[in-house]
Amino acid sequence: MQWRAGTVVEQVRRWPGAVEYSVALDETADPPVRALAYTAMVGEPAVGERVLLNASALLRGLGTGGLAFVVARTDHLPADPETGPGHIVKARYTPMQQMLLAVDEQDSPHHADLADADDLAGMPVVVADLHSALPAVLAGIRSTHPHARVAYVMTDGGALPAAFSRAVAGLTDAGWLASTITVGQAFGGDHEAVTTHTGLLAARHVVGADVAVVTQGPGNVGTGTRWGYSGVGCADALHAAEVLGGHGIASVRVSGADLRERHRGISHHSRTAYGRALLTAADVPVTTLPDAELDALVREQLRTLVITARARLTVVEVPADGLLEALRTSPVALSTMGRGLDSDPAPFLAAAAAGVHAAASIDPSVSGRP
């Protein structure tokens, strides 16, 4: 952990739960750095105020997390929040741990709804590797079912604070997301949940969702090895959906522009998660890609995946008509690994196809709405 101290120069931008600042570091003539403050944790520093920063990711030049974080304000303590129920600690046993009210704990007003709940009643559950798939999945859902109620179940494979995601803030503001549920060590959603299982159950029985989308927060961990990446948790999420009587839908990670051979076509991450780690049946939507050569490669990879997978994978063909147009209606920018829709449409089309299939799988006779 690399500490730095500095003075707030200006407020750059803000969204619910977070404020980005420009901070001039002490004892250096270098330009000010970008620093993010989570308002629920440290409040809102003012221009001219001194702050302590965790600069580790910034100094290493990491992608998604390549900025500093405000750890404390040296001269001001934020006011204590109002005391209330809740005893679930997240970021446990770290200096930044906080106590939160989980939707499934005894003090929650929803505890009675979840105490014996163990059935999603066939609710479609779309599982994706990268956080960047979320707006594309939602675009696909809305293209088929404009009024579908969608819950985002955010796992802790990437960013832990939900407030780090400008996409979640924008999708919520636009009415595309009914609720965000942060599970495991992730925190800051509309609801907290202890496990992915109770997060999914809350999506159905508390939020009344028609569809749940499960993916990690922004950012992901990868090591260039077969198993050492956070997206392997896709299999665990699909296992949870199956155990609880949900309809598991595996969104494949696809790229036509990634220069790394292991990610071209269907990423080796998807092939490992769905072909090796997954032990339960799932649907795998696919759609026609505009690049004929890439489309042929994806379909060949998918055929191999279905044959070699340990679980039964059902390929579902989704028409491509209207998908690009639906993606262009997204209220937030579409970007994955630094590439947008025009430079690499494949990942977004694949995610949107999963959304279309999920919307088509909604059972109108079953409603979890409170």
Image (tube, grey):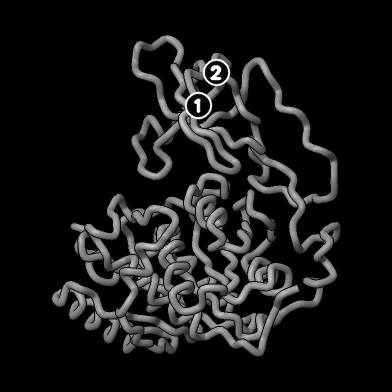
Name the residue: 67% across, 45% down.
Answer: 92
The quadrant in which the C terminus is found is: bottom right
Q: Amino acid at mark 1?
A: Gln
Q: Dot 1 corresponds to which residue?
A: 11
Q: Find out whether the residues at labels 1 and 2 contact each other: C-beta distance under 8 Å.
A: yes
Name the residue: 50% across, 49% down.
Answer: 165
Q: Quadrant of residue 367?
A: bottom right
Image height check: is 187 above or below 318? above
Q: Amino acid at mark 2?
A: Val
Viewed as shown, does residue 173 lie left or right of 356?
right
Name the residue: 36% across, 65% down.
Answer: 327
Q: Quadrant of residue 16?
A: top right
Separation (CA) of disc 1 from disc 2: 7 Å
Query: Neighbour class for label 1 at 10 Å: few (<14), some, many (≥20)?
Result: some
- Tell which of 252 and 168 is nearer to you: 168
- Tell which of 135 and 272 is nearer to you: 135
Residue 36's label in the rendered image is: none
- Tell which of 369 and 108 is nearer to you: 369
Secondary structure beneath dot 2 equals loop
| Identity of the residue furthest to the left in this view | 293
Q: Dot 2 corresponds to which residue?
A: 47
Name the residue: 75% across, 28% down.
Answer: 79
Viewed as shown, does residue 326 lie left or right of 83?
left
Q: Position of residue 355 (x, y in %)?
A: 45, 74
Viewed as shown, does residue 290 lie left or right of 127?
left
Image height check: is 297 above or below 105? below
